[in-house]
Image (tube, rainbow, N blue to C red):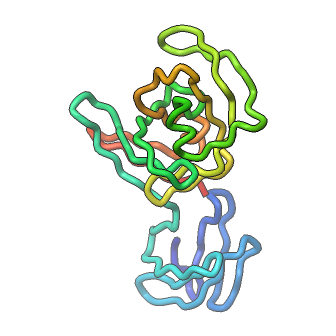
């Protein structure tokens, strides 16, 4: 966000720059409520944000690597806490069947698929998760594979979730930001 005379320029959804004056609303629903010297008060989806220059409303989470260099998080799958590993090498979220049942994952309509893992090819069930949340980042209707052998000791947060995020690694920190 930058201030221009009597208005502000905002980048909306990482795709459109809109110039707004107090009281105006962009086609995407961003409304400028008030303008000050250090920033602006905007409203998005009924929620107000006090935005200093250069700030963003995007949900961001910073993770720290464990002693082995892995990023372990508590994710909420369908609202149920699940221990998970951030895994950019996994095409989809991968869970064992017991953990999926605990999270209330529906198996009606699940399709049998063949997946290729580090341990070799396996049979799995392909399902849709209603929601996956890590910190304040929430993604809805996310594809997952379920291992029927319960061989996965931890849920893998794969690319079916991560593709909606920007990831930035610096040293032992990984910053995840929800794309707008």
The quarter in which the C terminus is drawn is bottom right
Q: Quadrant of residue 94?
A: top right
- Residue at position x 47%, y 34% from top? 155
128 sits left or right of 150 in the view: right
Q: Nearer the viewer, residue 127 or 33?
A: 127
Residue furthest top in the image: 120
Task: Count the marks.
Answer: 0
Q: Let me know if residue 123 appears in the view.
A: yes
Q: From what the image shows, is residue 174 above or below residue 156?
A: below
Residue 29 image offset from top left, x and y in percent: 71, 75
Q: Nearer the viewer, residue 84 or 21?
A: 84
Which of the pair 62/38 is nearer the observer?
62
Residue, x 46% and y 25% (percent of image)? 152
95 w.r.t. 174: above or below: above
The answer to whether residue 94 of the structure is visible from this angle is: no
Instruction: Name the residue: 48% across, 32% down.
Output: 156
Q: Position of residue 174 (x, y in %)?
A: 36, 43
């Amino acid at each position: 966000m930058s201030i221009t005379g009597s208005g502000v320029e905002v980048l909306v959804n990482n795709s459109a720059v809109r110039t707004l004056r107090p009281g105006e609303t962009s086609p995407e629903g961003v409304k400028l409520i008030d303008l000050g010297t250090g920033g602006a008060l905007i409203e998005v989806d009924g929620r107000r944000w006090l935005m200093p220059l250069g700030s963003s409303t995007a949900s961001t989470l910073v993770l720290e690597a464990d002693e082995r260099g892995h990023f372990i998080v508590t994710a909420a799958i369908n609202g149920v806490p699940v221990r998970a590993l951030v895994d950019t090498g996994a095409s989809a979220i991968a869970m064992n069947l017991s953990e999926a049942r605990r999270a209330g994952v529906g198996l009606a309509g699940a399709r049998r698929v063949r997946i290729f893992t580090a341990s070799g090819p396996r049979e799995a069930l392909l399902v849709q998760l209603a929601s996956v949340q890590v910190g304040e980042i929430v993604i809805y209707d996310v594809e997952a594979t379920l291992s029927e052998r319960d061989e996965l000791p931890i849920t893998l947060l794969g690319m079916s979730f991560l593709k909606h995020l920007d990831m930035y690694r610096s040293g032992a920190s990984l910053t995840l930001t929800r794309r707008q």
